[in-house]
Amino acid sequence: MLGNAGTKSAGAGRFKLGTWGWVAVFVLAALVPLFGPSGYLLDIGVNIMIYAMLAYGMNVLLGYTGQLPLAHAGFFGIGAYTVGILTLKAGWSFWLAWPAAVALCAVLGLLLGLVAFRTKGDAFSIFTLGVGVIIMLVINKWDALTGGNEGLNGINPPAGLEVLSKGVGLKLSAGFYYLALIALILTVLAVARARGSVFGRSLIAIRGGEDLARSAGIDVFTHKLRAMMLSTAIAGFAGGVYAVYVGFLGSASAGPAMTFTVLLYLLAGGLGTLAGPLIGPALLYTLTQSLKGLQDYQYIVFGPLLVLLIMFAPQGLAGLWMKAQARRELAAVTGKKGAERA
Amino acid sequence: MPEVVQSEVLHSGSELLRVEGLGIRFGGLHAVKDVTASIPAGQITAIIGPNGAGKSTFFNLISGFYKPTSGRIVFQGQDITRLKTHEVVASGMARTFQTTTIYKELSVLENAMIGHRVRTRAGLLDALLRTGRERRDEQESRDAAMTALTRVGLAAHAARPAGAMTQEGQKRVGIAMALASNPKLLLLDEPAAGMNPEETVSLMTLIRELVAGGLTVTLVEHKMSLVMSLADHILVLHHGQKISEGLPAQVSRDPAVIEAYLGSHAHGGQMGQTATGAAPHA
Amino acid sequence: MSTFLQQLFNALALGGVYALVALGLTLVYGVMRVPNFAHGGLYMLGAYLSYAVLTGLGWGYVPALIISAIGVALLAAFMERVIFYPMRNAPHVHPMIAAIGVLFFLEAAVQLVWGPDFKQITEPVPGIVNVGGVIITWQRLLVIGASVVVMLGLNYFLKRTMTGATIEAMSQNREGARLVGVNTNRVGMMTFAISGALAAAAATLIAPIISVSPSMGEVMNLKVFAIIILGGMGSVPGAIVGAFLLALAEVFGGYYISLDFSDVIGFAMLVLVLALKPQGLFKRGT
């Protein structure tokens, strides 16, 4: 029962590009639209950033807290549809609807957690998968509100985004790119802060062994609830960007297939790392887009890839790098110890 | 009489924890049945008994890990029977586990900091907004963890991965994690398991130091040598029930205890160890 | 009254199929502690294998059922050897994620081979029968009869044979079984094979009533998981009772409330039960 306290995972959070590394990555990303790239390239960029946000949200629960949430895309859908419905039907500004969607997802995440965390481990995942399907079905069947099968059409770009973009001599697509980039930066900042805090350390403790965490005095249930809220709020945050970016919503974007795609991206990048949720989508989404033939049957490749990753490199690419670094550190430590003895 | 005792909680020998009619059933089986006992403050209490006597279960009951099906637990005059595990820790009781159950992938310091979480209040919002409380709590966790590591003699190893420590080192990390919660009562579940005699002696020294510093320690232990030389007070369980309680010398002469150990074939050797283990006692 | 009986027969047929699929899932969970998300994929594959034997080879319904059951059993055993056995000591979310990967692969592979369209399997015994005023198709009677026979067979296997007793012992206490010297290594593979065979048989039985499609496994997956959570994960009687409860709720809920939401009823039940009894209706003995 307590035996899994020391999981094989190397310490999370130790893998950091460092603050300056992140600044460099984001500055480079911010420079991209200035070189007048094709709309196609910017589109790939925006999609990667939306997937990355989703992966960051999932990482809070799966990577840091050790809980596999399978309703994740459901909250992405709720965030997107909330923005879509509030702007289209209630006439709200995107800039109000977006935070409202985030708040709604956080509250719904809390409600889900209150029931779902009464179950543990496997049952939790299965339960959330069921909830994910219910969310998709409700979106699909509630014609009056969501447009049902027809979807939700004609969501406008955020007020002022076009004017702002044109004002500085850029296309609207570049404006969307910057919107997504800023949202991504906020997401990374929030997740990094949460991970590096007293709160985040408690999540890592829960991941390492729930019974041990409980005995060490951690209120496991409350911490899981908060992690769930952060995770679903981020999913809703990403959903808001997605809604205004594509302008059209269908219920499939809220379904389990979307959740599994995010899971695959997260695993490829690196579970429980800060860079992984960005690396995974950047590599795999680009790969899917560049191999057109792959798109229809991508899971012939991605299914086995998911299996191989979880079997042989559960910490993904970032984890492999981290493991190599840990090995160097350990070599340094044992080397020093040997020297002391000698 | 108990009222008088409560006002003197901190005096050595007064009652720190009391269990009344404590019991738990798993299915039809009484793992622990109707145990009434008390743990005196400022002393080392050992819980012993043949294998399957219910020692670990009893331990899990007082630390709030299992919920009893009958009886109650009073700690520092407060009824803690129905508290959740983390609330029991908050009330001033911390524990370690039989095996070296710690966070092996985290640093020694982080392990100890996790133990201090129960004393801090900063939550998710504090983390996101980097509030003053977050910064204070983080600093306080670090300080408390370093203090705990100093107490167990691991301050110099703070930055090492806990999994890279020796068996004994990992036991100390576990104790530091418990100490970081600033407990009144420390529960050690078979602290000497898997240790060589040298390590055992060094661990005994540590336990004595902690008690000298005002802590109350209760331990479950198989090694009779350790128990007889270390404990001030012994509680003997057999088939989930208390069969004897008192000073080590009294308990080891108690016919009921001798019979229990002799009757349990596999553990005849344990009492035998008292003889060989008498050396460190002197 | 006859409508009620009619619906009851429908529910029994559906419950029988659910029970066969859920039994395999709960046995695998009990023995391996793996929530096999690929189980729905095995079920779906079973339907396609039968379809292939029936239309490709032109053989009969019974040979199709047997070949499909054997084929899926072999694949499930292979999966256990190559994926789940090596991961037996990994953190519990890892095998779950691997199973999701397998599910995706199976769906994509079936779609590649047979295409995304619906396929139809014709009823082996067409027509209807009048049982005391209640009209029921032969196929539904066949489903009820066959699932009862298979369940009795499984019960005999678990209670009366050495291997079966071992599986049951392990699902109740893995460590205990290891201590008694049971070869736990091979039992996992056996259990996976049995679960695959049960899923394929269930799929072949119900295929003539519903149509066969690559996504048929996803829906079934969710339902049988709901069932085994309801019944207590790893519990054999729990899976059977849960299966018939869900079928009754769906059929009567769909008839008296709304067909649109009959698929949601199971999950609503699940949410309700978990909110009240997080351990499920039948808590497993430890």
Image (cartoon, rainbow, N blue to C red):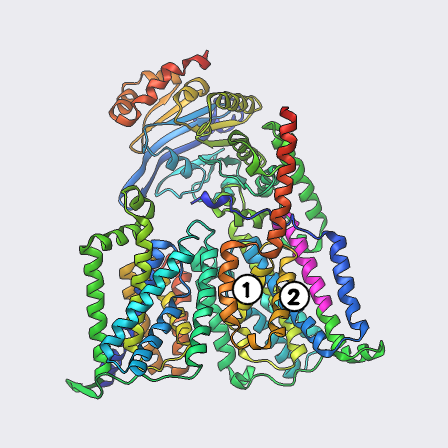
The amino acid type of the residue labelled 1 equals Leu
* Element on which disc 2 rests: helix
Q: Residue at point 19% right, 55% down?
A: C161
Direction from residue C151 to residue A245 in the image, left or right: right
CA separation in Å, label 2 and label 1? 12 Å
Q: Is residue A119 visible?
A: no
Q: Earlier in the sequence, mark 2 or mark 1?
A: 1
Residue carrying label 1? A264
Binning the other alpha carbons within 10 Å of mark 1 as few (below 14), some (14 to 19) or many (20 upward) gives many
Of all residues, the one furthest to the front in this rendering is C57
Q: Which mark is residue A282?
A: 2
Direction from residue B70 to residue B162 in the image, left or right: right
Residue A195 within the segment the image draws in magenta: yes
Which chain's residue wears label 1? Answer: A
Q: Quadrant of residue A60?
A: bottom right
- Helix, strand or loop: magenta stretch: helix
Q: Residue at point 53% right, 42% down?
A: A217
Q: Position of residue A55 (x, y in %)?
A: 60, 63
Q: Position of residue B238 (x, y in %)?
A: 30, 29
| Viewer-closest of B49 and C176 | C176
- Residue range corresponding to the magenta coloring: A181-200
Which chain's residue wears label 2? Answer: A
Q: Position of residue A196 (x, y in %)?
A: 66, 50
Of all residues, the one furthest to the left in this rendering is C132
* Element on which disc 1 rests: helix
Q: Which mark is residue C58?
A: none
